[in-house]
Image: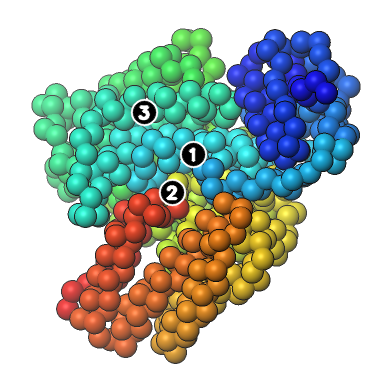
C-alpha cells in the first residue's frame, strides 16, 4: 500500500505546518505511514487535502467579518480521506487540531508530555463539521519568569487548543526572560549571564514561531513614555538609569517635582499637555510599526503605576484619558500618512478607567479597546445583570480604584458610551490570584464564567495576562480558558470531566475529588482576605487527603501513557507541597507568626529544590513572589 499523503493547497507557512502536524499525529494514531506532499496542490493518492477556503470553495467554510482576525473551519473527512479548510492559513491549522480533538487527541499542558493521542484504525478517522469560534480574540500575554523553551512550548500549545494570539510585552520582553536566567527567588541555582541583546534574539526567534502558525502577534504596551526619551523600559525591578538632562522637563510634575516615578521609568508618566512630548511618543510608535511588519496589533499604553499624572497648570485641568485620546488621534494621522495600517490597542486601566470628557477617536476602526480591571476581585465573575453603580469622582492623583466587579464594569460602560468598536478583556486570573487556590478548581470556575459572559459586556474576547506556567497541579483553568473562548456554551462540569479523564485516565475521579478538597481547604475567598479564614480544621485534613492521593500517584506513575504518568507525578509533588502550605496557613490563622514564617520557609525551599521537576508547570519565581509577604518573620 502506498504511503498515505497530506496535500497542502497553499505554500503559506501555517498550512505547511498544519500538514506536518496532521501527518505526525495520524502516523501515531493509525500506526500507518503518513507523509506530506512536497509541492502544494500535488496530485497524488492522499488522505486529506488542506488549505484556505479560496482553494477549497466547496468545503463550506463559514463566512467571517475580518479574514485576518477571525477564524472559521470546515472539516469533511471520512475513513481517512477528505478536506480541511479554513478562513485563513491560521484557521487551516486550527481545523487540523479540531479534527484531531474530535478523534480524541488532547493537549493537557505544553510539551511532549502533555500530548495524549488515541490509537484508531484509519477507517475511524472520520468527522464532518463547520465551526466558528465564538470570540475573535483568544490570546495569552507573556508574564512571570520564562526561558525560551517555556515560551516556545506555550506558542506550540496555543493553536492546539483553539487559541489564536500571543502578546510579547515591551520591546524585547527582557524582564520576563531575565527573571528566569538570573534565577530570581531561587538562590539554589546560580544566575546565568543574560543581556538585552539575548532577549531581543529570543523574541526574534519566537516571533518566527508565531508566524509559522499564523498567530496574531501583539506587541509592546508600556514603554512608550520612557523609551523615546532615552530611558530604557526593561522592567520594574532594575536600578533606574540616569535621566537624560533634556528629558527632565518632559516628566510629569508630581508633588512639585519632575522625576522618575519611584525610580521606575516604566511607571513614569509625562507632561502630556506638552506638544513635544506627544510628538516624540507618536514618532517612536510610527518608527517601530514601520520596522516591525510582523507585529499585527501594537499596544500603546501610558505608564504603569497609578496616581502618578502631571499636576502642572497645563495638565491639571484635563483628564489623562483626554490627553490619551488626543495622542491616539495624532498617532492615527501619522500612521495614515506613513501608509501603515497597523492596528492599535488602547488601554483602560487604573487612572485611565475614567473616560475622556471632551476627546473622541476620529478613526475608531483602527483601534481596539482593552479593558484591564487589575484591581478587581476574583471572588465573583462578571454579572451582566448587576446594577451599574455611579463612577467615583475623578480626583487627580487621589483616586481609589474599584474592587468589585460591578464597579469595574461601570467604568467599561462609561468608555463604551463613546467607543463602540472592537474590544477585549485583558485580565489577570492566572497572574497572582490562582495561588490563592492550590486546587485550581474555583479559579477555573470563575475564569469560565467570566469568559462565557464577555459578550454581554460588549467584549469580543480575552487576552490573559498571566504566568506562562499555570499547569500545576493541572491545566484545568487553561482548558476552561481555551474551550470557553471557542464555545461560550461549553459547560464547566463537562470541561472538568473531559480534562481530568485526559490527564489521569483510571483514577481521574480520585484526582478530581482531591483537587476539589484542596480548593475547599485553602478557601480562596479567605486567602484573598475577603472573609475570615481559612478554617484551621479544614487545613488539618489536608495531610490525610494528601497521603491518600500520594499512594495512588505513586502507583499510577507507571501508566504506559507518558502524558498520564506525568500528570500523576505532578499530582504527587502537589500533594507534598499542599501539606507544607497547609501548615503555614494554619499557623498564620492561629496567630503564630513565627511558626507560620518557619513553615513558609519550608514551602519555599520545597519549590526551589524541585524547580527542575516543576519547571514546565510552576513559575517558582512568581509563586514565591506572590505568597511570601503573607508569612513575614516574627
Badge 1 density bin: few <14, some 14–19, many ≥20, Cα 10 Å: some
Q: How many marks?
A: 3
Q: Name the residue tied to disc 1.
A: 153
Q: Secondary structure at mark 2?
A: loop
How far apart are the alpha carbons under marks 3 and 2?
18 Å
Q: Foreground residue, 480 or 16?
A: 16
Q: Foreground residue, 235 or 227?
A: 235
Q: Name the residue tied to disc 2.
A: 616
Q: Name the residue tied to disc 3.
A: 202
The spot of residue 141 in percent (x, y) is 46, 41
Q: Earlier in the sequence, mark 3 or mark 2?
A: 3
Q: Is residue 202 above or below residue 263?
A: above
Q: Secondary structure at mark 3?
A: helix
> Is residue 72 in sight in this rendering?
no
The spot of residue 466 in percent (x, y) is 45, 49
Q: Foreground residue, 494 or 192?
A: 192
What residue sits 74% from the left and 45% below the top? 119
- Camera-near label (3 vs 2) is 2
Whether residues under marks 2 and 1 lie with C-beta atoms below 8 angstroms apart, the answer is yes
Amino acid at each position: 500500500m502506498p504511503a498515505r499523503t497530506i496535500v497542502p493547497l497553499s505554500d503559506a507557512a501555517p498550512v505547511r505546518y498544519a500538514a506536518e502536524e496532521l501527518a505526525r499525529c495520524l502516523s501515531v494514531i493509525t500506526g500507518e505511514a503518513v507523509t506530506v506532499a512536497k509541492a502544494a496542490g500535488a496530485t497524488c493518492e492522499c488522505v486529506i487535502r488542506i488549505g484556505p477556503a479560496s482553494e477549497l470553495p466547496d468545503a463550506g467554510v463559514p463566512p467571517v467579518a475580518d479574514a485576518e482576525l477571525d477564524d472559521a473551519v470546515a472539516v469533511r473527512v471520512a475513513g481517512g480521506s477528505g478536506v480541511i479548510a479554513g478562513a485563513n492559513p491560521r484557521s487551516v491549522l486550527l481545523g487540523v487540531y479540531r479534527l484531531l480533538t474530535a478523534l480524541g487527541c488532547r493537549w493537557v499542558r505544553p510539551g511532549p508530555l502533555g500530548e495524549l493521542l488515541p490509537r484508531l484504525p484509519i477507517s475511524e478517522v472520520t468527522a464532518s463539521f463547520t465551526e466558528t469560534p465564538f470570540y475573535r480574540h483568544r490570546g495569552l500575554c507573556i508574564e512571570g519568569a520564562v526561558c525560551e523553551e517555556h515560551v516556545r512550548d506555550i506558542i506550540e500549545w496555543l493553536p492546539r487548543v483553539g487559541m489564536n494570539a500571543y502578546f510579547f510585552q515591551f520591546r524585547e520582553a527582557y524582564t520576563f526572560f531575565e527573571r528566569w536566567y538570573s534565577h530570581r527567588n531561587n538562590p539554589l541555582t546560580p544566575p546565568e549571564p543574560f543581556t538585552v541583546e539575548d532577549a531581543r534574539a529570543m523574541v526574534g526567534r519566537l516571533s518566527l514561531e508565531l508566524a509559522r502558525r499564523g498567530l496574531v502577534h501583539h506587541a509592546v504596551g508600556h514603554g512608550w513614555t520612557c523609551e523615546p526619551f532615552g530611558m530604557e523600559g526593561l522592567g520594574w525591578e532594575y536600578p533606574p538609569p540616569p535621566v537624560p538632562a533634556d528629558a527632565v522637563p518632559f516628566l510629569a510634575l508630581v508633588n512639585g517635582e519632575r522625576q522618575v516615578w519611584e525610580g521606575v521609568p516604566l511607571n513614569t508618566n509625562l507632561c502630556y499637555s506638552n506638544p513635544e512630548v506627544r510628538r516624540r511618543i507618536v514618532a517612536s510608535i510610527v518608527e517601530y510599526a514601520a520596522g516591525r511588519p510582523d507585529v499585527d496589533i501594537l499596544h500603546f499604553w501610558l505608564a504603569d503605576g497609578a496616581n502618578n499624572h502631571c499636576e502642572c497648570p497645563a495638565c491639571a485641568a484635563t483628564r489623562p484619558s483626554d490627553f490619551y485620546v488626543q495622542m491616539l488621534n495624532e498617532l492615527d494621522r501619522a500612521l495614515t500618512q506613513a501608509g501603515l495600517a497597523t492596528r492599535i490597542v488602547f488601554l483602560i486601566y487604573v487612572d485611565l478607567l475614567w473616560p475622556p470628557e471632551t476627546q473622541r477617536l476620529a478613526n475608531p476602526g483602527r483601534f481596539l479597546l482593552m479593558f484591564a480591571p487589575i484591581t478587581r476581585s476574583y471572588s465573583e465573575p462578571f454579572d451582566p445583570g448587576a446594577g451599574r453603580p455611579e463612577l467615583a469622582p475623578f480626583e487627580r492623583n487621589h483616586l481609589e480604584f474599584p474592587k468589585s466587579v460591578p464597579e469595574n464594569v461601570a467604568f467599561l460602560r462609561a468608555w463604551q458610551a463613546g467607543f463602540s468598536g472592537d474590544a477585549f478583556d485583558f485580565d489577570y486570573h492566572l497572574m497572582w490570584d490562582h495561588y490563592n487556590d492550590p486546587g485550581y478548581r474555583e479559579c477555573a470556575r470563575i475564569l469560565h464564567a467570566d469568559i462565557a459572559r464577555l459578550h454581554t459586556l460588549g467584549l469580543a474576547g480575552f487576552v490573559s495576562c498571566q504566568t506562562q506556567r499555570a499547569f500545576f497541579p493541572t491545566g484545568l483553568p487553561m482548558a476552561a480558558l481555551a474551550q470557553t473562548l471557542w464555545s461560550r456554551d461549553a459547560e464547566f462540569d463537562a470541561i472538568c470531566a473531559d480534562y481530568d479523564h485526559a490527564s489521569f485516565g483510571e483514577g481521574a475521579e480520585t484526582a478530581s475529588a482531591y483537587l476539589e478538597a484542596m480548593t475547599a481547604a485553602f478557601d480562596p475567598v479567605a486567602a484573598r482576605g475577603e472573609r475570615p479564614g481559612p478554617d484551621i480544621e479544614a487545613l488539618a485534613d489536608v495531610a490525610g487527603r494528601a497521603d491518600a492521593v500520594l499512594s495512588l500517584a505513586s502507583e499510577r506513575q507507571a501508566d504506559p501513557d507518558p502524558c498520564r504518568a506525568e500528570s500523576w507525578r505532578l499530582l504527587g509533588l502537589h500533594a507534598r507541597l499542599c501539606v507544607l502550605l497547609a501548615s503555614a496557613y494554619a499557623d498564620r490563622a492561629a496567630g503564630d507568626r513565627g511558626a507560620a514564617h518557619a513553615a513558609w520557609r519550608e514551602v519555599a525551599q520545597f519549590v526551589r529544590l524541585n524547580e527542575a521537576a516543576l519547571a514546565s508547570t510552576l513559575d517558582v519565581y512568581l509563586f514565591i513572589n506572590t505568597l511570601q509577604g503573607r508569612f513575614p518573620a516574627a
